[in-house]
Image (cartoon, rainbow, N blue to C red):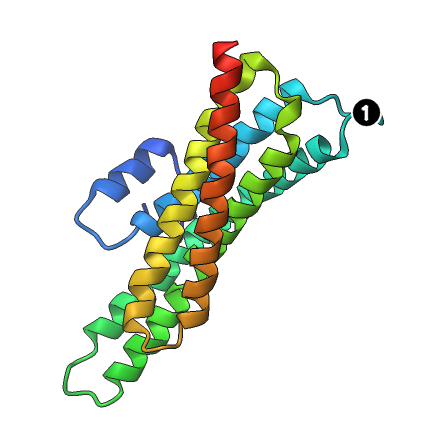
Amino acid sequence: MSEQATIASTTMRTFLAALAARAPTPGGGAVAAISGATGAALLAMALRYSVKRDEQAPAAGREAIDAADDAIDVMLALADADVRAYADVSRAFATPRSDPARGDAIQRACAGAAAPPRSVAALSAALLTAAVDASDAINPQLASDLGVSADLLLAAAAGGERFVRVNARLASGAADEALADAKRALAQASEAHSHLIAQAATLLDS
């Protein structure tokens, strides 16, 4: 995977090969964002089969479809942003230890690297909440898809929070607000995920 290529423009095999390589990027932050994009796409599909897009359709269902569609591109962009941000972190750590600016460079880079996963966590939580609002319309035949999309979005939120946490630890307070936001997003995502998984199980067992 070349430095100029975006994740969205690469084949899945090329991306997986880059992910498996002994290289710093792409890594877990990008994977969290891609998990979010995949979860959003699957949620959109499940809702499209379940919600009629007409004036009689529940507004929550139509709004959740639109939100999921928008989130796909945003999550893919966040995956690329994460790759760029971690490259900045790597460059900061490569600064000679004798350089007096090294510490500040690491702090700035890590604070910047907290931004993409913070957004991944927040967007995943928002989508899971939107899915809860629209889930009464889910066709029972799509219950398994609903459950998988919820699992993927929770994984994205958890991954986002985790990478904010690791960067905040090195940012010396500059990413404390991002960490607080990510923790709130993960709590919100977990609550919504539990609701969706319970609903999916009910539909599957009915």
Q: Residue visible at 15% across and 82% down?
A: 97
Relative vertical location of residue 189 with respect to residue 78 in this rendering, above or below: above
Side (left or right) of 206 relative to 180 = right
Relative vertical location of residue 136 with respect to residue 93 in this rendering, above or below: above
Q: Residue visible at 51% across and 17% down?
A: 202
Residue type highlighted by circle 1: Asp
Decide if residue 148 is in sight here.
Answer: yes
Report x, y in % for residue 13.
Answer: 31, 32
Decide if residue 9 is in sight here.
Answer: no
- Rendering quarter of residue 172: bottom left
Relative vertical location of residue 48 with respect to residue 124 in this rendering, above or below: above
Task: Give the labeled residue for mark 1.
Answer: 54
Side (left or right) of 120 relative to 136 = left
- Rendering quarter of residue 130: top right
Q: Nearer the viewer, residue 33 or 175?
A: 175
Q: Nearer the viewer, residue 122 or 7?
A: 122
Side (left or right) of 24 relative to 54 = left
Question: For the view shown, which residue lies furthest in the right direction?
Answer: 55
Question: For the view shown, which residue lies furthest in the bottom direction?
Answer: 100
Report x, y in % for residue 72.
Answer: 54, 40
Report x, y in % for residue 116.
Answer: 44, 58
Q: Residue visible at 29% across and 62% down?
A: 166
Q: Residue visible at 51% across and 30% down?
A: 196
Side (left or right) of 196 relative to 25 = right
Relative vertical location of residue 74 with respect to residue 105 in this rendering, above or below: above
Q: Looking at the rendering, in which quadrant would you find the N terminus?
A: top left
Report x, y in % for residue 4.
Answer: 40, 53
Q: Secondary structure at mark 1?
A: loop
